[in-house]
Image (cartoon, grey):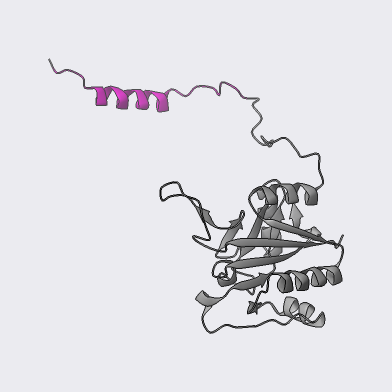
C-alpha cells in the first residue's frame, strides 16, 4: 500500500479548501479606515515636528519675500558657493531678490548645493515627495551635498495616500516615471553599525515652507 506523503496531504488540503468555500469569518471588519491616530496639530506643525526628528532643517516663511531673505542669509552664513537651480519659476523668483544661481553645471557629481521645488509635503511622515516630472528631474535631489526644498503650505497633505490622490489628479492619472519620498538626509549604518551621512544623497536637507493659504 502506498503511503501518502506530507506534500500530497498539503495539496489535498488546498484543493479541498478551493472547492469547499467558507464564509468570511468577520464580514463586518473595517478595512478602509486608517490605522493611525489623526494628529491634533495643524499640517505644517506636524510636518515640522516629524521632519526635524529625522535631522531635517525646517524654516517657516510668511511669504516669498521672507523666504528669499532667509535663503540669502542661509547661503551667506554657511558660505555656500555654486548654488544650482534648474526650475525656471524658482530661478526667476530668487533672481528678483538678488540671489545668484547657476543653471546647468558641467558635472552634476560636483554640485554642492541644489535648490528645487517638490510635489508634496507629507505631514505625518515629515517626508518630501518629488517626481521626475519636475524640471529639476532626478539629479538635483541626489547629487548635491546640500538639498534645499522650497515648498508652499498648499502642498501639505496629511498622509502618503493623500499625496498619491493629488498626484494622480495633477497629472491626469498619467503618473511620472519616478516618484520618490525623501525622509531626512541620506544616511546608512550598514558598515559596522556606524552612521554615515550622505551615503546615497545629500548630507543636509532643508525645507523652506512658504505660507500661501
The residue positioned 62% from the left and 70% from the top of the image is 133
Classify residue 44 as left or right of residue 185: right
Q: In this orientation, does residue 204 appear?
A: yes
Q: Nearer the viewer, residue 174 or 196?
A: 196
Q: In the displayed structure, would residue 41 be above or below residue 19?
A: below
Q: Position of residue 78 (x, y in %)?
A: 68, 70
Quadrant containing the N terminus in the rendered view: top left
Classify residue 192 as left or right of residue 43: left
Q: Position of residue 11 (x, y in %)?
A: 31, 27
Q: Position of residue 100 (x, y in %)?
A: 72, 82
Q: Position of residue 122 (x, y in %)?
A: 69, 52
Q: In this orientation, does residue 166 appear?
A: no
The residue positioned 53% from the left and 55% from the top of the image is 187
The residue positioned 41% from the left and 28% from the top of the image is 18
**Residue range highlighted in magenta:** 2-27
The residue positioned 79% from the left and 52% from the top of the image is 44
Amino acid at each position: 500500500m502506498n503511503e501518502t506523503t506530507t506534500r500530497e496531504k498539503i495539496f489535498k488540503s488546498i484543493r479541498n479548501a478551493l472547492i469547499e468555500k467558507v464564509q468570511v469569518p468577520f464580514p463586518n471588519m473595517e478595512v478602509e479606515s486608517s490605522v493611525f491616530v489623526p494628529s491634533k496639530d495643524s499640517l505644517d506643525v506636524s510636518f515640522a515636528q516629524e521632519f526635524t526628528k529625522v535631522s531635517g532643517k525646517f524654516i517657516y516663511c510668511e511669504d516669498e519675500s521672507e523666504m528669499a531673505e532667509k535663503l540669502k542669509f542661509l547661503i551667506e552664513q554657511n558660505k555656500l558657493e555654486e548654488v544650482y537651480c534648474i526650475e525656471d519659476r524658482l530661478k526667476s523668483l530668487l533672481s528678483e531678490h538678488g540671489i545668484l544661481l547657476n543653471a546647468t553645471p558641467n558635472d552634476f557629481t560636483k554640485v554642492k548645493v541644489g535648490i528645487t521645488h517638490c510635489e508634496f509635503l507629507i505631514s505625518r511622515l515629515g517626508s518630501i515627495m518629488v517626481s521626475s516630472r519636475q524640471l529639476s528631474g532626478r539629479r538635483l535631489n541626489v547629487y548635491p551635498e546640500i538639498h534645499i526644498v522650497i515648498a508652499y503650505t498648499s502642498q501639505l497633505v496629511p498622509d502618503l495616500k493623500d499625496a498619491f490622490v493629488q498626484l494622480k489628479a495633477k497629472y491626469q492619472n498619467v503618473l511620472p516615471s519616478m516618484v520618490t519620498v525623501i525622509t531626512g538626509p541620506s544616511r546608512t549604518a550598514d558598515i559596522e553599525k556606524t552612521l554615515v551621512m550622505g551615503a546615497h544623497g545629500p548630507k543636509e536637507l532643508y525645507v523652506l515652507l512658504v505660507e500661501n493659504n
